[in-house]
Image: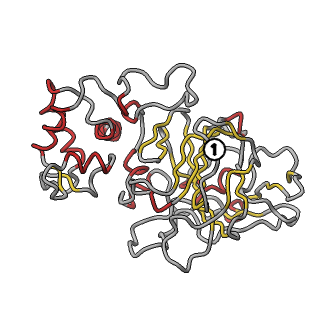
Amino acid sequence: MKNIRKAMLASLSLSCLLCGAAHATPRADALMKSFDTNGDGKISADEWLGNKRRFQKIDANGDGFVTPEELATAFDNAPAGAGPNGEAREGGAKANSPEPHKVPLFQLKNVNSQAFLSGKTPKEQMHAIGMQESGLTAVFPRGGGCHPIDHVFGEVWQGGTDKNKLHSGADIPAPYGEPIHAMADGVVVARADGGGEGPRKNRGVLVVLQHSPQDSGLPVWSYTLYSHFSKAPELEIGQRVRMGEYLGPNGRSGVPGASREPHLHLSAFISESPRYAVANDTVVPEGGRFIDPIALFRGQLPMDTALMRDLPAAQKVTPAAYKRKSGEIVPAGAKLIWPFLCKG
């Protein structure tokens, strides 16, 4: 219930604080208690999980903190009944929407929104929803000659000095401009062109695909996130893509440090529900968990990181299907492939 409440409150901040003046003080108090993690009676920019421009607007005196009084004023000025981006609060996606499973953040159930939205979520909380090293390794049948991973999922992030920050995906180095391909059939549910305000903006240019069980052959809904493209892919939200379809060129947009070579940052999430929300270009799946992208190639449950960690060493070696530069899929019939074409 606590996580659901936080998700609901976070959605308020993203939507100009959803309720009218009649309920301003109680709602403002609840939002303050949810976001004020250090208990100092005000919300700093780091504690705020919503849109940063909204934070700056609410912070009337520009001191870098939102006070209860400033929150109450923001509630007083909010349009009655307004929802995220000015939409009505009731219901989910509109009829005939290209995003039929997208809903406002506050409607999601069983979700830890902070883990997806905040880059400063405590390590223990990230471990609880799957972000830790799994020990899985990918191997490629018939001498695939595929670009391998050099920084694994769940390790301490190598891009800074914060030893509590974990790597949310797997890094695959490849030449600048090397084509990146969709790992499975799916739908574009998010994209960012390298700017933005959220804590994940260091991912640069990115695309997120949602894959139904029919798309991937997996018994769950899954998501693949591809980032650091050298330029924005020519894809639209709601667009259907096919396994092996070209997404965009590899690059290093958003990559910290001049010495790091171009690479694909690949993240994966799973959920039993098709519903998701998007905030600050970040996809938040309902009941979502982070998994090692290699776990997708198991083709079956379990995939959760804690269970992967407990597997015998021999079972952690995972064959990964791929597409040859000739167009051949190895092995034939695979529904999920490596994101770069392979030489083998």
> In which quadrant will I find the N terminus?
top left
Spot occupied by residue 208 in the image (x, y as percentages of width and height): 58, 47
Residue 310 visible somewhere in the drawing: no
- Can you say whether 297 is above or below 5 in the image? below
How crowded pointer 1 is (Cα within 10 Å; few <14, some 14-19, many 20+) is rated as some
- Can you say whether 92 is above or below 171 in the image? above
Q: Which of 191 and 145 lies nearest the eye of the viewer?
A: 191
Residue 318 visible somewhere in the drawing: yes
Q: Residue at x 75, y 52 (%)?
A: 337
Spot occupied by residue 221 in the image (x, y as percentages of width and height): 60, 38
Disc 1 marks a residue whose amino acid type is: Leu
Spot occupied by residue 144 in the image (x, y as percentages of width and height): 83, 64
Q: Dot 1 corresponds to which residue?
A: 235
Spot occupied by residue 248 in the image (x, y as percentages of width and height): 67, 55
Query: In screen coordinates, is 289 left or right of 292?
Result: left
Query: In screen coordinates, is 198 left or right of 53?
Result: right
Q: Which of 272 and 81 lies nearest the eye of the viewer?
A: 81
Q: Residue furthest left?
A: 69
Disc 1 secondary structure class: loop
Query: To which quarter of the image does residue 242 belong?
Result: top right
Q: Residue furthest bottom?
A: 259
> In which quadrant will I find the C terminus?
bottom right
Q: How many marks?
A: 1
Q: Which of 90 and 233 lies nearest the eye of the viewer?
A: 233
Q: Residue at x 87, y 52 (%)?
A: 327
What kind of colouring is applied to the model shown? secondary structure
Q: Residue at x 55, y 27 (%)?
A: 100
Q: Residue at x 56, y 50 (%)?
A: 304
